[in-house]
Amino acid sequence: MTAPTGQTVPAQPHPRAAPRTPPPVVAALGAAAELYVALHRDPELSGAEERTAARFAAALTTAGLTVERGIGGHGVVGVLRNGPGPVVMVRAELDALPVREDTGLPYASTATAPGPDGAPVPVMHACGHDVHMACVAGAVQVLAAAAGEWRGTLVVVGQPAEETLTGAAAMLADGLYRRFPTPSVVLAQHTAPLPAGMVAHADGPLLAGSVTLEVVLHGRGGHASAPQLAADPVVTAAAVVLRLQTVVSRETSPAEPLVVTVGSVRAGGPGNVIPESATLQVTVRAFSEAALERATAAVRRIAAAESAASPDPLPPAPDIRELSRSRVTAPDPRLTAALRDAHLAAFGPQRVTRWQPSMATEDFPLYGDGGLDLHGVPGVRLGYWMLGTVGPRQWAEAAGGAPGAAAADRLAALAPNHSPRFRPHPRLSLEAGITAMAAAVRAQMVSVKVTSEPSPGDGGDVPQSSEGPW
């Protein structure tokens, strides 16, 4: 996910995990926690997830899945066939972020890796992908142990390069839906700065779509002492950055969510040299394809217009290329209702809440109809929910804060996704994530009634219900 949530801090106390954790989850927690710590200590950047893929594949193999690696890069696919029934796919992400961890945890990452320019950068699981993998591995263990109570085929995907919005497309292009059982339903959950132990579903869009553009503005270099003999692209870049703010404030209705962000500005070197060019990276986010296209067109228009205002007699047009694009994450409404019911049965109403749409974005929609050009399988339904990860103490600090503390300061105490201080509560996050994923998969499989053999004098078979999450 490429941005933190915009959720506000509720006033209610932290809803701690229910006191009675289902025994199958208790049995899976130890191995899931070990996997989580190992993944967190040793993160890898997008496209370089070799050790991460090996660990995740080993966990799936231990649970009894048939596993293949190297799908669309370092992608992992595990299959558990359990008789005739639906094919349900579960997705977790492998990659971490170029963020220096500042949590103080005993298992904090100190890893570094080569960045895009080859220079070393710090690496951290600052978006919870280590939680996602550990929860999926734990849920698979729970489901495999209860294989007599459901029928169908479970496909587990460990996707590389989610943060660069390229991994889903790469796996699909590499034959994910041709080489493995084709799902009718694809499920995923994502960490969020909500109380650990809670899950949240959206009514309608859950995450925004996005387009990221690289804009190269050309000038005419020269000596800093003689700016009249040059055409300074830095000035043009500054004008573009300021003018882009009007796309939201003056070209978009206040009722329509839209974000335009200049995330990168690169130009020049020594302070006494006017450079030849300046490069911007601009991301637009919205909840409709029409809004994305309108905002993207505005970025192109403004860059061209400001370039034309350059003092160069024949200013070159800017070079603009699309670096990435993602669709709006809008889970299937009927599937969302079924998943919410499954989670209500698993957690109770106090731990299931509503999610307000977030401007974060990701490539998960490609597994559904948004990726028809990649897989050609219409009608794949998507289910997606948010998983709270904030522990009771951290939540209390954020919800209460110091006397007179501003709401923004309290919200910052949550240390949301992509923060160097992002630190999920391990026990509560894993427990809820395993429970939520296992319950969601079970709700989409064929349920099998389990009966015990009659004991002498007990009057016959005693049905053991499998209606609940276990």
Image (cartoon, rainbow, N blue to C red):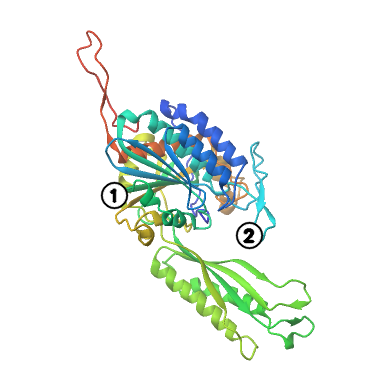
How crowded pointer 1 is (Cα within 10 Å; few <14, some 14-19, many 20+) is rated as: few
Is there CB contact under 8 Å for labels 1 and 2? no
Q: Which amino acid does label 1 sit on?
A: Arg
Q: Where is residue 432 in the image (x, y as percent from the top left)?
A: 45, 36
Place of residue 139 in the rendered image (x, y in percent of width and height, measured from the top left): 42, 35
The residue at which mark 1 appears reads as: 334
Residue 148: tell me if it is visible. Answer: yes
At x 61%, y 77%, the residue is 217
Amino acid type, residue under disc 2 in the picture: Pro
Quarter of the image where the C terminus is located: top left
Q: How crowded is mark 2: few (under 14 residues within 10 Å), some or many (20 or more)?
A: few
Q: Indicate which label's residue lies in the foreground, 1 or 2.
A: 2
Q: Which residue is drawn at 28% across and 27% down?
A: 465
The kind of secondary structure element at disc 1 is helix
Report if residue 196 is visible in the image.
no
Front position in the image: 380 or 55: 55
Q: Who's the residue at 36% across and 57% down the image?
A: 375
Q: In the image, which disc is placed on residue 37?
A: none
**59 with respect to 451 (left or right):** right
Residue 337 point in image, percent of width and height: 31, 46
Which residue has dot 2 on it? 116
The outermost residue toward the top is 457
